[in-house]
Amino acid sequence: MSENSNRIRSTGTLQTIDGKKYRGYLEADEEGATFYSRKTAQPLADWRYNRMHRVDNIRRGGTSTQMTVILKDDNRYIIELDHGLKLHTYIMDHWADKPVIPRTRGEELHRLAELRGEKIQVPKKHLITRRHPNRSIAGDIGIYLLLALVGVMMIFPLVFLVGSSLKPLDELFRFPPPVWPQHPTMDNFSDLFVTMGQSWVPFSRYLVNTVFITLVGTFGHLVIASMAAFVLAKYDFPGGKAFFAVVTTCLMFSGYVTGIPNYLIMSNLGMIDTYWALILPAFAAPIGLFLMKQFMEGLPTALIEAATIDGAGMFRIFWSIVMPNVKPAWLTMIIFSVQSLWNTSAATVIYSEAKKTLVYALQQIQAGGIARTGQVAAANVIIVAVPILIFVFSQSRILETMASSGIKD
């Protein structure tokens, strides 16, 4: 763009009413605007501001500007300027007969108040915005007090557990027991690692066993449950409803009831005293299949049909469309699976000491008597730390709304 005295210029393209396009530049002054082609010195379009009827389709991005100028004689020009922001503002400022800018009722009241010289009352911004203005302040206070009480009741066991792990022995046996130690110490954790180091199986071996079982079992559970849930939720086949009814019925049985059948199956497969005695039953846990199917049923079938029409394969639909939209479900399932596998002792299916889990090793410390009470408290903190941390880092994803909540099938 260039400026000469009172004229402003910008290069661009002009499209006339018959569809022809011309490359050149647009010049504007206080009276009107003129478009010149690069090939001819004669103007292709020339209008005064009093001939303009309206300006439509205004688009401004970066330094470019596109607008449609409609004259009172129904001639129109579509102009796209390379550097036309300043030129567009110049034309709008000198167009005296441009239509009145529509105002809202509030804007009009403010304008009239300014004309009368009155002081405009600006509403105060509150630090706390009430989501339910129809509820009384006493109701808000009551709800917050109830929530605070429930929160204290839920956090108290964790605080007491951490406090017990930091207490010296004399405070551990004090009655009534203090919630937080008066003289915090890390001796319980150091004693725990010393005791674990004296075992003929290193402490790291127990940790590696637990991590391996937890990761493989959770991954397999996620893959198998997701694929099965996708078929059950979005496809009809003979026996599908009966199979899901069996899965739902299995939710009523605890691990103590299914322990004996699992042992007999693993024994016949020759997997007793191996990692697979814990991993394979985790693959078939019914809670994951139930959660995934319930979430996938809320996913619009139109998304899957549209992907099929576009040529996407079944696995592509499952991996690229279904799984991202049910993220809260499989994150919740991961938490349940990790809690179950991390806290298992596996004493009934694994006999080799080198294959034992971390929980089993810590339970052996608990059997050491009163002298190891502090070590037991430290061990309990280690056991519950991993599931809690996983939940803390993934809670925002678990609570987020599914992408299909705003889509109607």
Image: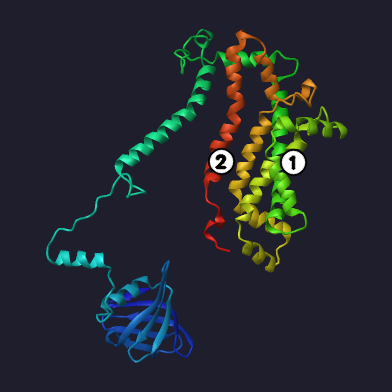
Q: Earlier in the sequence, mark 2 or mark 1?
A: 1
Observer able to see residue 383: yes
Q: Residues within 10 Å of mark 1 (few under 14, many from 20)?
A: some
Quadrant assignment, res 261: top right
In this rendering, the answer to whether 258 lies above or below 32 is above
Q: Position of residue 297 (x, y in %)?
A: 63, 55
Looking at the picture, which amino acid does disc 2 mark?
A: Ser
Quadrant assignment, res 278: top right
In this rendering, the answer to whether 37 lies above or below 394 is below
What quarter of the picture does the N terminus occupy? bottom left
Q: Position of residue 216 (x, y in %)?
A: 73, 37
237 or 191, which is in the foreground? 237
Q: Which mark is residue 394?
A: 2
Q: Residues within 10 Å of mark 2 (few under 14, many from 20)?
A: some
Q: Report whether 352 appears left or right of 395.
A: right
Q: Position of residue 315 (x, y in %)?
A: 72, 57
Closer to the eye: label 2 or 1 = 1
Residue at the spot of label 1: 284
Looking at the picture, which amino acid does disc 1 mark?
A: Ala
119 or 152, which is in the foreground? 152
Q: Report whether 28 appears left or right of 66.
A: left
Q: Mark 1: which secondary structure?
A: loop
Mark 2 to mark 1 CA distance (whole Å): 24 Å
At horizontal 32% and vertical 74% (from top left) the residue drawn is 3
Q: Position of residue 14 (x, y in %)?
A: 44, 83
At horizontal 38% and vertical 37% (from top left) the residue drawn is 144
In this rendering, the answer to whether 298 lies above or below 169 is below
What quarter of the picture does the C terminus occupy? bottom right
Q: Mark 2: which secondary structure?
A: helix
Observer able to see residue 223: no
Quadrant assignment, res 330: top right
At horizontal 48% and vertical 25% (from top left) the residue drawn is 156
